[in-house]
Image (cartoon, rainbow, N blue to C red):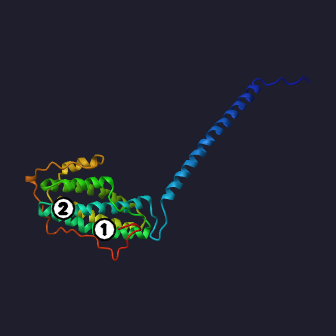
Amino acid sequence: MRPRPPIKGRGIFSGTGLIITGLAATAAALLFPLWSYADRQGAATANVLSAQTVTTPYGPLSAQDRDFVTKVRLAGLWELPAGELAEREGTTSAVRTAGQHLVDGHTSLDAHVRTVATQLGVPLPNEPNQQQKQWLATLESARGQDFDRRFAGILRLAHGRVFSLVAQVRAGTQNSLVRDLADDANTTVLDHIKILEATGYVDFAALSRDLAASPTPVPPPPAVDPGAAVPVTPSPSETYPLPPATASPVAAPGGP
C-alpha cells in the first residue's frame, strides 16, 4: 500500500494557528498590566476618599464637612468686625442696622461653630484669611457714603458666594452636627443678604457679573449714585430670625 500523500495546506494552517495563538498571548501580556494598573488606580482613589472621611458618633465627617466648619468660623472672624464698622461708620440707619445684624448673627453662629468643632475635633483658625483681611482694610479706609457702598457691595457679594456652599453642604452631609450648623448658617446668611439689600446700595447688575466671574481679592464698589440710594423698608410680614445661641459654648483647642 502506498503512503497517503500529505494534505496540501495543513502546514500553512498549522503555522497560521501558531501565529494567531502567539499574537493573542502577546496582547494578553500587554493588556494585563494596563488592567492591573487601572484596578490599582481605582483602589487607590477609593482609599484616598475613604481616608478623608472619618467616623464620629454623629455620623461620617467628610473633608467637605471639615472645610465647611472652618469656613463658618472664618466668616465670623471678618464679618463681625465689618458689622461693628458699619454700626460706627454707616451714614444711614439702614446701613447701621445691617451692621447690627452681622454682629448679632455671627456672635450666635460663632458660638455654635466653636461647640461643633470641639465635638468633632476640628481645629479652628483664630484670624481671617488674607482675602478677608483685605476686605476689612478696604472698609476701614472708607468714609461716608463711600463706606456705605463698599460695605453693602463687598458683604453682599461674599454672602452670595457662601450661600451656595451652605446649600451644597446641607444637601450632602451625613453628619448630624454639620447639618444643624448648616441650618443655622443658612438662616444667618439669608438674613444678612436681605438686610444688606435693604440698604439700597446693592447694584444687582454688578453683583451678577461678580458672582459669575472668578473671585477677586477686593471687589470694586458698585456704581450706585449716593444721592440715588434709597433704603428699602422690609414689609411688616418679613422677619429676620437669628440662629438660637448655643448654650454654654465650649471653645475649640486654640480658639479664643
Question: At 27% from the left edge and 65% from the top edge, which residue is drawn?
Answer: 188
Question: At 75% from the left edge and 29% from the top edge, which residue is drawn?
Answer: 14
Q: Earlier in the sequence, mark 2 or mark 1?
A: 2
Question: At 19% from the left edge and 51% from the top edge, which residue is drawn?
Answer: 204
Q: Quadrant of residue 166?
A: bottom left
Which residue lies under the disc numbered 2?
86
Q: Amino acid at mark 2?
A: Ala
Say which of 3 and 38 sits in front.
38
Say which of 137 and 65 sits in front.
137
Which residue lies under the disc numbered 1?
109
Q: Is residue 99 left or right of residue 52?
A: left
Residue farthest toward the right in the current orientation of the protein: 1
Mark 2 or 1, closer to the camera = 2
Gap between marks 2 and 1 measured at Cα: 19 Å
Rendering coords of residue 139 (x, y %): 21, 55
Figure label count: 2
The quarter of the image holding the C terminus is bottom left
Q: Is residue 245 visible?
A: yes
Q: Quadrant of residue 66?
A: bottom left
**Residue 48 bears which disc, if any?**
none
Q: Is residue 179 left or right of residue 30?
A: left
Q: Is residue 159 left or right of residue 256?
A: left
Q: Amino acid at mark 1?
A: Leu
Rendering coords of residue 159 (x, y %): 26, 57
Q: Does dot 1 land on a helix, a strand or a loop?
A: helix
Image height of 110 relative to 129, above or below: below
Rendering coords of residue 233 (x, y %): 12, 63
Rendering coords of residue 4 (x, y %): 85, 25
Q: Does dot 2 land on a helix, a strand or a loop?
A: helix
Q: Residues within 10 Å of mark 2 (few under 14, many from 20)?
A: many
Image height of 90 relative to 4, above or below: below
